[in-house]
């Protein structure tokens, strides 16, 4: 894709609300700034810190992470690169998953673990209050109300400003909202994976942000109509996939992640890509 005439800006995506917080509708997901398998240190620690700083230069003001990314590495790098944080930067993190090794993920959403996880995130991120703290999963061994209730208590104590939930269906979302105000849902979603469409629609109706994880599903994108639309716009397929997400629902708050400055700039440039009605019809077909 030819270099844009002006520097890309996340502002082109418009704005999103997370309770009383206002952010650009294109954020940054910090899972990929860790090592392989989302485990351990990245190969280029200074390089990924440069990515984080560049994201802010491109007007990204919402960063999503989790204590399980590394584990702990992603949160530590965010603090090293960006603290003291500029006004307006919103950092969201998550608790409820533990790690035993690369590619290994286990659920622990017990109130005891969630409290410990939140305290650890506060320390690593060098914060007194986490802007958005998300329950990372549903743990079948723990009543969901107990897990959400633990976050409600942390919110009451001032350690969490807003609560989000992740990997939920409509039932869990309704149960969580009956316990504590919820500002966001983070579920897997992309142009090729739309199992959470009804949850997305609920978020749009209720004024919640919908944060799609794995938003670029590269292999499936390449086998779809996306490359054809991308060629027509002189864009990359990944940029079209992001532009489609932004056009598909006003609730959408994509958080594409990368450990490359060039890839970051390409992702942010997608905020200004306007798809026509014909493009959207082809991609939805």
Image: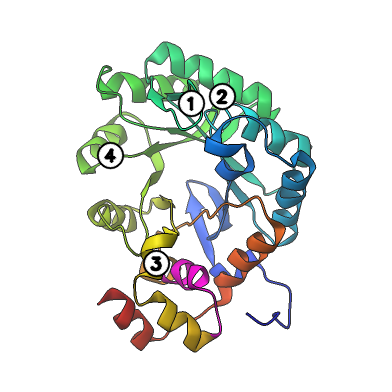
Of 270 and 121, which appears nearest the observer? 270
Q: Which residue is mark 4?
A: 173
Q: Which residue is mark 3?
A: 221
Q: Position of residue 253 (x, y in %)?
A: 47, 56
Mark 1: few/some/many CA within 10 Å (<14, 14-19, 20+): many
Give the secondary structure at mark 4. Answer: helix
Q: Which residue is mark 1?
A: 155
Q: Which residue is mark 2?
A: 159
Report the span colored magenta.
234-244
Which of the two discs, 2 and 3, sits closer to the camera? 3
Which of the two discs, 4 and 2, sits closer to the camera? 4
Query: Which of the marked residues, 3 or 4, is nearer the chain's N terminus?
Result: 4
Give the secondary structure at mark 1. Answer: helix
How many angstroms separate mark 3 from mark 1 (CA)? Answer: 39 Å
Q: Is residue 241 magenta?
A: yes
Q: Residue furthest left?
A: 171
Which residue is rendered at x = 23% and y = 55% of the image?
Answer: 198
How many angstroms separate mark 2 from mark 3 (CA)? Answer: 39 Å
Mark 3: few/some/many CA within 10 Å (<14, 14-19, 20+): some
Magenta portion: prevailing SS class: helix
Which of the two discs, 3 and 4, sits closer to the camera? 3
Which of the two discs, 3 and 1, sits closer to the camera? 3
Which residue is rendered at x = 48% and y = 57% of the image?
Answer: 254
Q: Are marks 2 and 1 in contact (CB under 8 Å)?
A: yes
């Amino acid at each position: 894709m030819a270099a844009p005439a002006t520097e890309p800006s996340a502002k082109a995506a418009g704005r999103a609300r997370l309770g009383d917080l206002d952010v650009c509708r294109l954020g940054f997901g910090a899972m990929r700034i860790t090592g392989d398998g989302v485990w351990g240190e990245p190969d280029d620690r200074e390089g990924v810190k440069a990515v984080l700083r560049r994201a802010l230069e491109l007007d990204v003001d919402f960063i999503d992470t989790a204590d399980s990314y590394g584990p702990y590495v992603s949160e530590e790098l965010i603090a090293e690169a960006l603290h003291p944080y500029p006004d307006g930067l919103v950092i969201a993190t998550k608790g409820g998953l533990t790690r035993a090794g690369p590619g290994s993920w286990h659920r622990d959403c017990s109130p005891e673990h969630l409290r410990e996880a939140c305290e650890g995130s506060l320390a690593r991120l060098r914060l007194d209050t986490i802007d958005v703290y998300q329950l990372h999963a549903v743990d079948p061994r723990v009543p969901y109300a107990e897990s959400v209730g633990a976050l409600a208590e942390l919110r009451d104590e001032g350690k969490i400003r807003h609560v989000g939930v992740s990997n939920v269906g409509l039932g869990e979302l309704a149960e969580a909202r009956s316990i504590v105000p919820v500002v966001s849902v983070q579920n897997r979603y992309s142009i090729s994976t739309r199992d959470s469409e009804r949850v997305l629609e609920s978020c749009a109706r209720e004024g919640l942000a919908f944060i799609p994880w794995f938003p670029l599903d590269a292999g499936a994108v390449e086998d779809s109509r996306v490359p054809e639309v991308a060629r027509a716009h002189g864009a990359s397929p990944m940029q079209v996939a992001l532009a489609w997400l932004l056009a598909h629902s006003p609730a959408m708050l994509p958080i594409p992640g990368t450990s490359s400055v060039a890839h970051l700039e390409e992702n942010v440039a997608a905020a200004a890509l306007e798809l026509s009605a014909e493009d959207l019809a082809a991609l939805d077909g």
